Image (tube, coloured by chain):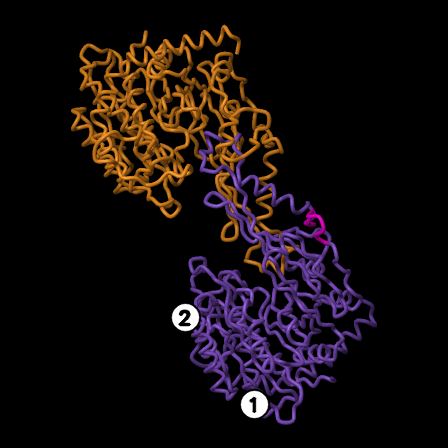
Chain colours: A orange, B purple
């Protein structure tokens, strides 16, 4: 970086700090005065098992959120499918007198299925505090009865990050704004989905049945992690995913490997050979047509990626590997390419693998016509959620970026694409709107896995972020 | 085959039929008169769960066999280890007045662990009859109260073949001989091991503690299947096995495949690549040194293999695959080479594979010095059982071959090596003796897997085979 550039950055940081210092104290004051109350409500929500297929418990979550919103006067209601068989979405609204525009805040209250036996010392639906990340030797702690709570502590529970943290940050941001008599310029709506981790199979139907309620100038998606460096992010698409199960068949009946080994084809070996043939030594997918239709990143997108902190080496060191897979490319570059991942693989009892294709579908840049072509045939056959694009330069995007930036003393990271999967195209296919993702969780939250956790400071920051987005004034 | 050769074979078969017809009627008469009694005792033995690590049940099996032998006046006793913590062997003997030589019949009463949920329509320790093999549409049948029992019926239960069939055939052969007042020329001993499927970890100690009892001019191992063509076999060694667990480590904590896919090395893919690198397209193992020290088969061994029925195409058709792994070689040739097999493989929850190395260790031909060299370093580190050689031309071998042949109208198959694994070297390392395996089970018995079964005719044939070996007169 040149001396001049350094000076500009330094000045910018001073300015940002000033903005953040101005913007945040009311929210921060509210939070500081209500930490135990917030965490009490949050841990009670986290204590309800929330796998979408667990019909009884998933409705207990919805009911709990209904009560959270009733206490806040947000006129909540369940949005059911026609059969009322699926997890309902929970809807509420904060009508602003005179406001003609609306934004809707989305989070999901269901979580990934998990095997309690894989958790270390704690259980998925018994929220427990640790003094730091488990991987860094964090110990189980009791919340002190009074006094300051160390915001580096982590709350261990399924969906602590993904995505009940979103529900909690959004509703607490509302609390803070109302307590401080700060009124948004836009009508604020809320929708909390109950089967995002199951692939949002009924969100489309729910939108169709409740189009007026769910119409908004933007959907703000509060889900996913902030940048690994700790910087906040605004994200304009996700990679999405498609899954395919591959089953390799061997002999019709079980064979003794001693009596037939060397002669009978071994399904496990055939599976290993098939899977390993799908990538070359540099991590490039070798399936014909895999990268067809992948458009190069636009100039603004390339710049945004270049501006993001270089964090790969630090991350490799943390994660304990020396060489990344996509040789010669950075994580952020690689996230912008379709990937092929083996989700799971087993043989012996069964001989099956679940390769997972992470492939963009139209989510990169507003103008990109990133079509279905880039999905390989096998992946196209599987259920998938494709993903809506939103550009950096739309008025709403500019306003969201500014709002998130106003809460941070560090430059935020703008990403054309995050790696995850969200029902963005389900939303944009049905409503003339854009989706912008504003994640709040710590990057090392063990999302989707055992020992999921939320760093407390990320919840505190997330409340400020959500409040800032609620009170933005886009130039429509 | 030349006309002359055809004539010789035809004459030989006539002669063999005559021998078999002469030798077997007394045994067959006994069996026909006692079928229900034999099967009643057998199914009660099969009903006792028999995984070696199931301490309580494994001793119930031993006690049941003690009682079987007490009823027969065989002076049974448990052979314990020093701590009496392990499954005991059951020992008994039939002392023949004036006999100076002994042979000992070995079988094992423990079975492979199995998951009852993987069985189809029946359970491992609830013996059930089927009208044919499950894979051929065999239906569950009740044993008729009287009249002939169809000997193509199959008994489904863990260890129906492997290896309680051995226990049953040996003790019933004794019954038949005694009932017909046929006295062997040799002292007959019996040993039934209780942890063969666990790798015989205490058989060596049991032999050391009871060397006098267990000394014999030969150990006759009744375990394993006859040839796929249905022909009986005499087998002079087994391939043995060594196991190694391979664990591939990825990132230190679980990563979201969307956020990190393409960049973070995927342990499942690394495992697939590692395993698939171990064999080439022809099925040849590519690990350096894998085939070092493999001696070519001797002339007698090659001839024996050439004389075995060509059955590979029929077997491939039955098993449902078109191409075998060791391109250009027959099953019997390939069994005489060390193999590498993936026993199981899993990722997602764990990222582990269990390659299994089937490698000869001295078991091929009496004179072969087939040393440890042929085992790759990884395999040598794992627990294994290496295997004793016995030559075709030892007097005891000639006598066993003749005895087995005397019970069959078809030429029997002589094999230098079978594919399985047996504690042969544990025996021969401690006792100056030879081991010869005389298997009786049907080849399609689903050994070690779910739906293990025994074709009834194989038990009937096995009784005759064991009786013939008991009454052989080797020219020592």
Q: Secondary structure at mark 2?
A: helix
- Left or right of B352 in this view: B310: right
Relative image position of residue A101 (x, y in whole percent): 26, 12
The stretch of residues the image draws in magenta is B282-291
Residue B154 seen from this side: no
Q: Earlier in the sequence, mark 1 or mark 2?
A: 2
Relative image position of residue A94 (x, y in whole percent): 20, 19
Q: Nearer the viewer, residue B423 or A32?
A: A32
**A274 versus B412 height, above or below:** above
The part of the image, by quadrant, that contains residue B226 is: bottom right
Residue beneath disc 1 = B178
Disc 2 crowd, CA 10 A, few/some/many (<14, 14-19, 20+)? few
Relative image position of residue B476 (x, y in whole percent): 74, 84
Q: Residue at x 72, y 55 (%)?
A: B329
Say which chain tag 1 marks: B
The answer as to whether the residues below labels 1 and 2 share one chain is yes
**B179 versus B276 height, above or below:** below
**A231 versus A396 height, above or below:** below
Disc number for residue B346 = none
- What main secondary structure does the magenta stretch of the protein show? loop
**B340 versus B227 height, above or below:** above
Q: Residue at x 60, y 41 (%)?
A: B273
For marks 1 and 2, give the one nearer the viewer: 2
Q: Residue at x 29, y 37 (%)?
A: A86
Residue beneath disc 2 = B56
Relative image position of residue A358 (x, y in whole percent): 49, 30
- Left or right of B52 in this view: B285: right
């Amino acid at each position: 970086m040149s001396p001049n550039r350094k000076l500009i950055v330094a000045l910018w940081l001073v300015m940002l700090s000033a903005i953040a210092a101005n913007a945040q104290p009311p929210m921060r004051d509210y939070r500081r005065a209500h930490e135990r109350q917030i965490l009490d409500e949050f841990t009670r929500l986290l204590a309800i098992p929330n796998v979408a297929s667990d019909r009884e418990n998933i409705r207990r979550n919805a009911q709990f959120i209904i009560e959270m919103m009733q206490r806040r006067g947000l006129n909540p209601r369940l949005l059911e499918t026609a059969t009322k068989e699926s997890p309902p979405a929970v809807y509420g609204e904060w009508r602003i007198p005179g406001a003609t525009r609306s934004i809707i805040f989305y989070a999901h209250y269901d979580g990934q299925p998990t095997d309690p036996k894989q958790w270390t010392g704690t259980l998925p639906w018994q929220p427990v505090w640790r003094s730091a990340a488990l991987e860094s030797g964090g110990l189980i702690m009791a919340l002190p009865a009074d006094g300051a709570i160390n915001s580096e502590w982590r709350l261990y529970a399924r969906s602590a990050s993904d995505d009940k943290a979103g529900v909690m940050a959004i509703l607490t941001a509302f609390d803070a704004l109302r307590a401080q008599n700060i009124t948004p310029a836009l009508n604020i709506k809320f929708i909390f989905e109950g089967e995002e981790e199951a692939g949002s199979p009924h969100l489309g139907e729910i939108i169709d049945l409740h189009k007026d309620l769910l119409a908004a100038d933007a959907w703000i998606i509060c889900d996913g992690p902030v940048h690994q460096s700790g910087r906040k992010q605004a994200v304009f698409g996700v990679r999405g995913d498609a899954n395919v199960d591959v089953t390799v068949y061997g002999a019709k009946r079980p064979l003794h490997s001693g009596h037939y080994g060397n002669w009978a084809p071994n399904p496990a070996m055939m599976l290993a050979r098939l899977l390993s043939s799908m990538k070359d030594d540099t991590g490039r997918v070798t399936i014909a047509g895999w990268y067809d239709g992948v458009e190069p990143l636009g100039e603004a997108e390339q710049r945004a990626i270049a501006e993001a902190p270089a964090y790969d080496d630090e991350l490799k060191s943390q994660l304990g590997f020396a060489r990344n897979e996509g040789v010669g490319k950075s994580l952020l570059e690689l996230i912008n390419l379709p990937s092929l991942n083996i989700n799971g693989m087993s043989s012996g009892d069964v001989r099956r693998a679940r390769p997972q294709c992470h492939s963009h579908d139209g989510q990169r840049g507003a103008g990109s016509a990133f079509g279905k072509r880039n999905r390989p045939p096998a992946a196209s056959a599987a259920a998938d959620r494709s993903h809506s694009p939103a550009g950096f330069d739309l008025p709403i995007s500019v306003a969201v970026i500014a709002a998130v930036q106003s809460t941070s003393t560090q430059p935020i990271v703008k990403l054309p694409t995050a790696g995850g999967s969200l029902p963005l195209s389900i939303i944009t296919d049905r409503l003339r709107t854009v989706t912008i993702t504003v994640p709040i969780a710590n990057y090392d939250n063990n999302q989707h896995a055992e020992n999921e956790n939320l760093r407390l400071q990320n919840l505190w920051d997330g409340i400020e972020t959500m409040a800032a987005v609620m009170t933005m004034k886009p130039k429509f």
